[in-house]
Amino acid sequence: MLKNKILSPSQSDAILIWILRGFALVAGAIAILITLFLLRESLPLLQAVGLIRFFSDSSWYPTEGLYNLIPMIWGSLLVTVGSVILATPLGIGSAVFYQYYAPPIIAEIYRRLIELLAGIPSVVYGFWGLVVLVPLIGRIQPPGSSLLAGIAILTLMILPTIALTAAASFAKVSPEYLRGAAALGISRWGTVRGVIFPAAKSGLFTGLILGVGRAIGETMAVLMVCGNVVQTPKNIFEPIRTITANIALEMAYATGNHRAALFVSGLMLMAIIIVLIAAAEIISQDKIYD
């Protein structure tokens, strides 16, 4: 009787598969519900004024019927692109260092430090940037709260994501590749450049896109250091406002069309994130055909 109550391996696997499918269904349903909620809150204003007004109005002043999001879209894109340009080589270089060059003890300590950076709350990064980084930039070019400050903070925040993803990709490279390179007498850097990077390119691109997603969705840190001025910056020392910071600043008191306009900006941000996730999925699938 007892034997009959014990599940076979195939039965256990089937139960596990259905549990995982349930979790996936819940996660997908949450994402769909969030998107539908944004659509419901945005649709009345979109029907009243149209989507074009969010790109063609003279400024962002929702209480007066002006809904131009272009300065904040530029602010979000510029701070994201700048931070990714800096964080990508630093993150991949960090992964190469502790994966292939550092002694085991140093590599373990270095990895723990990277993981610690990944765990620091964004408000702590923002507070440090506000009291240390912004005054330093202000000495070079006032006011200090600027696009440059946002780029610097986001670089620190997304660097661990890129570094840890790159390290995981390097760890999955077949040892046969390394042994083959060693047998051919290829140098360590030659192996990394000519063997490791091509073999791990799918994971490297995925880490890059995850870093972009983290940067473009960040709110608190950029709100604290970027100055929150609605304008398209002419240089990196001018203050900016991102879409996420704009939502956080104005949602508490927004009503009517103003509130709906903030939901439209959230919907745009959601669309950008969906595009990034789709790109990450496509890039990760490329490995199957490599």
Image: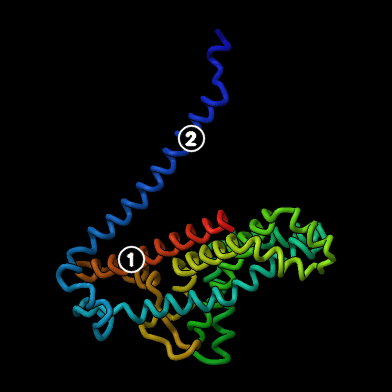
Is 182 above or below relative to 126?
above
Q: Quadrant of residue 18?
A: top left
Look at 58% across and 61% down and name the residue there.
Answer: 202
Residue 254 x %, y %: 26, 68
Q: Is residue 171 visible?
A: yes
Crowding at mark 2 (Cα within 10 Å: few <14, some 14-19, many 20+)? few
Q: Is residue 116 visible?
A: no
Along the line of sight, the residue nearer the viewer: 287 or 84? 287
Q: Where is the N terminus found, in terms of image quarters?
A: top right
Sooner in the amino-acid sequence: mark 1 or mark 2? 2
Look at 31% across and 51% down and name the residue there.
Answer: 33
Look at 43% across and 43% down and name the residue there.
Answer: 24
Residue named by callout 1:
266
Q: Where is the C terminus found, in terms of image quarters?
A: bottom right
Identify which amino acid the numbered label 2 is placed on.
Ile
Look at 31% across and 77% down and name the residue there.
Answer: 69
Residue 105 x %, y %: 81, 58
Residue named by callout 2:
17
Residue situated furthest top in the rendering? 1
Gap in angstroms between the C-alphas marked 1 and 2: 34 Å
Residue 214 x %, y %: 49, 65
